[in-house]
Amino acid sequence: MKKMCSLVAPVVFVLTLVARLAATDISGTWTSVFDSHVGRQEYRYTFVVKDTKLTGTIYGSQVGESQIRRGRVNNDAISFVESGTFQGSPFRIYYSGMLTSNNKIVFTRKVVGLGEAAEQIVATRVK
């Protein structure tokens, strides 16, 4: 009986780890539509996850396409930086969010240079 109990804990640990890793796979295309200080924004995020590293592209209706920078996925937590230009001026936006279901991420989006203003947006997986 003691041997059986000593085998159960590692199996449960591995199964839990596998379930958590599967839950954090956000690879694929996501979209978000929201109102911001510069008007209505339509975004498309194409995420690629390898281990805990997040890469991919971002397309914003007002800012065009850019590469994801400093992307990380840690369990259900996601963070990355968007850099680009808007009307000739450079910008940087920091994203931090949580995967709340297989098809929904809630992000806080902070634009550098706008003080402490942050926007909360929701991204949904494209099926």
Image: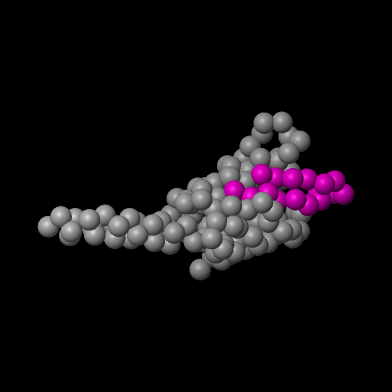
Q: Is residue 28 left or right of residue 40?
A: left
Residue 78, relative to residue 23: is it above or below?
above
Observer able to see residue 92 = yes
Residue nearer the viewer, 36 or 10: 10
Q: Is residue 14 left or right of residue 58?
A: left
Q: Is residue 35 above or below residue 113?
A: below
Looking at this view, name the residue that lies furthest to the right: 88
Q: Is residue 116 magenta?
A: no
Quadrant position of residue 68 = bottom right
Q: From the viewer's perspective, is 76 left or right of 56?
A: left
Residue at coordinates 70% horizontally, 45% vertically from top-left?
93
Q: Main secondary structure of the magenta part?
A: strand
Q: Residue at x 22, y 56 (%)?
A: 6
The structure residue drawn at horizontal position 55% and vertical position 50%, both measured from the top left corner, is 78
- Magenta residues span 79-94
Q: Residue 112, image x and y in percent?
A: 73, 39
Instruction: Check the image and name the residue furthest to the front.
Output: 3
Q: Residue at x 33, y 60 (%)?
A: 15
Q: Nearer the viewer, residue 13 or 53?
A: 13
Q: Is residue 39 above or below residue 56?
A: above
Residue 11 position in % (x across, y down): 29, 60
Along the line of sight, the residue nearer the viewer: 66 or 14:
14
56 and 102: which is toward the camera? 56
Residue 25 percent across, percent down from the top left: 49, 61
Q: Residue furthest bottom?
A: 127
Q: Residue 36: x percent and y percent?
A: 67, 43
